[in-house]
Amino acid sequence: MKKMPIVALIGQTNAGKSSLLNRLARKNIAIVAREEGTTRDNVMATIDDSFVLVDTAGLKDPTDDFEASIREQIEDAIDSADMILVTLDSSKYFDHRDKKIAKDALKSGKPVLLVLNKCDLGESLPVEEFRALGIAPENIFYTSATTGQGIGELKSGIFSSLETVSREPHEASEASEPRNDGRERAGSIVKKNIATLKLALIGRPNVGKSSLFNALGKKQQAIVSSKQGTTRDVNRVQVKYKGQTLEILDTAGLRKPGKREVGIEKFSAIRTLAAIEEADVCALLVDASEPHSKLDQSLAGQIVEAGKGIIIVVTKSDLLDNSAPTNFFGEENIKNRTAADFLIDALEKDFDFLPYAPVLLTSSETGENVTQLFELALEVDKSRHLEIKTSDLNKILNEAIVAHTPAGLKNTRPKPKYIVQTDTCPPWFVVHGHDLELLHWSWKRFLERKIREKYPFVGTPIMFSYRSEK
């Protein structure tokens, strides 16, 4: 699972950025309306398993100061994205704000494309009117998110420009994932991870990321280096724990003193996405004093989709009143269960798609379980590097077939024949057989459960591909 390039859509409101994202993703992900500033949060989509497209519209309420909003958009894109798409309405002359956006984007040194959207309206200005923005003519594209005009050319331009990006292509598609031809493994082993283990702290604003970051810095055995502010709003510290160097990434997004908005930490999806792509293991932080939200579940989904290790970390556990006869949702206590018990039950329910993710209750104030996060990170990283002997895998496969005969669609009987592991980080398994494209999803989940019964793969997703042999 390689790092996936991040492409950021930036520009003034009502230029059609959300519509462009929907058109490129071929689905309605972003909310689209005629009113300006409809998008309130960053929205993203994976395009053709090749890059992540992020719509940075609406980073602030549209009633906020425009210049500050645009500056924050540009800075996020410069620091975190690998390519920038400056988006304008092709029927309007650019103004000083558009010129400022294009100038700052070009200063970044990242590939920059100019997307002149809404060309279907029949009032598009000639390309000569936009050359003063400083973007090369070959990097200017007319598009219509409504009709699809120019979308193919734009995608070709993105792919061509991404060839200059240093990150390797993502290997998420079935056609590209196998890096092994199915040779017999020597045994169930764990490759020694001698590189620095990167642990990212991910979560909503005010969830306690910076406090935990500081607490972790105080609990390490030896500080290797401390580089705060290496990139904007991302603090980093390297620590050594039990002979392993860990680099902790704090994605809090705090501004310098005097420039912070009182009581507000601005959440930026593009910074968080970049941290997830960079990390090996992600600690998803949820606040013990607040019910978790759909955003927490969405962040968890992004971590899993990126193939990274995940630990659910409950912060501010010192605020839980375990003596009170109420649970996390205010219902009456039964069987003398504590507030922590009810909280864990709620987490298991809302994150039922992550049964393998460990849950850790911490308090940066008291230091409770802070060091335990290092232990879990090492355990999850060990799981990510685990390789299983092919004969052991096929024994599990045969047991699964006997216990639950594979069912297929359209009255077919798919026949899995054998399974091999093709990769690690995350572990990837390929099942070979006949008519596997018709295999029911429930049996696929059953097979994963059978593998995890013997090899838990703590905190790591495991990937599967199914290949039918003719």
Image (tube, rainbow, N blue to C red):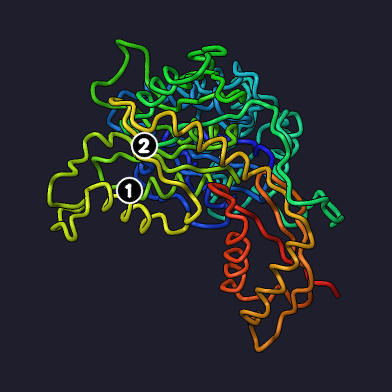
Q: Residue at x 82, y 52 (%)?
A: 185
Task: Please state if 348 lies on the left or on the right of 445 as rendered.
Answer: left
Q: Which residue is mark 1?
A: 293
Label placed on residue 175: none
Q: Amino acid at mark 1?
A: Ser
Quadrant (top left/top right/bottom left/bottom right) for the C terminus: bottom right
Report whether residue 408 is seen.
no
Q: Amino acid at mark 2?
A: Arg
Q: Residue at x 22, y 49 (%)?
A: 338
Query: In the rendered structure, which disc, 1 or 2, sits on the residue that comes first in sequence?
Result: 2
| Mark 1–mark 2 CB contact (< 8 Å) | yes
Q: In the image shown, does 354 or 408 lie closer to the viewer?
A: 354
Q: Are there few (<14), some (14-19), or many (20+) residues within 10 Å of tag 1?
A: few
Quadrant housing residue 289? top left
Residue 318, horizontal then vertical, whole percent? 24, 34
Residue 382, horizontal then vertical, whole percent? 63, 40
Quadrant (top left/top right/bottom left/bottom right) for the N terminus: top right
Task: Please state if 404 lies on the left or on the right of 429 as rendered.
Answer: left
Report whether residue 31 is seen.
yes
SS under mark 2? loop
Residue 276, horizontal then vertical, whole percent? 54, 36
SS under mark 1? loop
Q: Are there few (<14), some (14-19), or many (20+) residues within 10 Å of tag 2?
A: many
Q: In the image shown, does 23 or 190 lie closer to the viewer?
A: 190
Task: Please state if 330 lies on the left or on the right of 150 as rendered.
Answer: left
Q: Is residue 75 above or below residue 60?
A: above
Q: Which residue is mark 2?
A: 204
Quadrant housing residue 51? top right
Q: Is residue 23 above or below residue 73?
A: below
